Amino acid sequence: MSTDFPVLTKTFHTSVYRSIDPKNLSVAGKTILITGGGRGIGKAIATAFAVAGARAIIILGRTASVLENAVKEISGAAKTAGHESIIRHFAADITDAEAISHVFKTIRDEFGNVDVVVNNAGGLHLGTIEDSDSSAYVKSFETNVKGTLHVMQSFLCFGLNRNAPGPATFINLSTVGIAMPTMPTWSAYVASKLAAFTMTAFLGAEVGDALRVFSIHPGRIATDMSSKAGIPTFDDVGTYFGNEFVLSNRTDADDVQDSPVRFACGSLLSQRQTFCRRGWWRVIGMLMSFWG
């Protein structure tokens, strides 16, 4: 596939290939926590870690029944791949600081430190600045900024081992919207996600060598959240966001299992990977930013 911008390799891939397939990677012995892990992109990422043989995968979300069903699916994927990963779930809202602290403390007591955090949970409000109710507008910031802060702080206080032989990993799921021209009605969501993106950069600068920090956006993915916003299909997402910003040919969140998000979550833990400090790469439909 040809592109109109510089790429690092001669071949531009739009689907998974052997060297980045989680089936060919190992995260054995690692404890993974994923917020918003009960459905959509979060569940797909959890499944990727299960296929790669994580020791324990903990998913967070607000609806217990959704999480319970996700645990069954993720456990099944692990067993199919020949792994005995432990899958746990916690019904918790990231806007509740005490609840998130409790989750990390409980994980520490059962599994020890957390090796990888994927901050995937997010909230979406659509409306013009003029017409939006202020409380509804700020709700995006409650989830995407304040909630992200709670996850970061609890991880640093209760989940991160600063004396481990290797660094832990924090991955923030961003949005294609922060790399695009402005779109009417999207200001609350994009501004809050851009704030979280910047917070992620500061996290990497402040913590140092004990933590590798990444922010990625997975391109256009039709999810429950986009459907509620009136963007129900892959083609609709492309129309909204502009195909020039979308390089992958994924259609919905389940396809993320063999998409760039899956690649990122697997390869970030590979000992063969060399990382940039404070750099931006565009990789197969994702804007990937590395700090630390």
Image: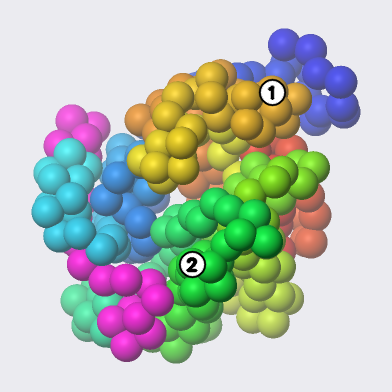
The residue at 58%/53% (across/down) is 127
**Tag 1: amino acid:** Asn
Where residue 227 sits in the image (x, y, percent)?
A: 41, 37
The residue at 70%/28% (across/down) is 242
User: Does residue 73 appear anywhere in the picture?
Assistant: yes
Closest to the camera, between mark 1 and mark 2, is 2
What segment is highlighted magenta in the picture? 75-100
User: Does residue 58 appear anywhere in the picture?
Assistant: no
Query: Can you identify the residue that label 1 sits on?
Result: 243
Q: Which residue appears farthest toward the front when viewing the image? A: 131
Is 145 in the magenta? Answer: no
Please tell me which of labels 1 and 2 falls first in the chain: 2
Badge 2 marks a residue whose secondary structure is helix
Query: Can you identify the residue that label 2 sits on?
Result: 136
Where residue 268 sits in the image (x, y, percent)?
A: 55, 49
Q: Quick check: marks 1 and 2 in contact, CB under 8 Å? A: no
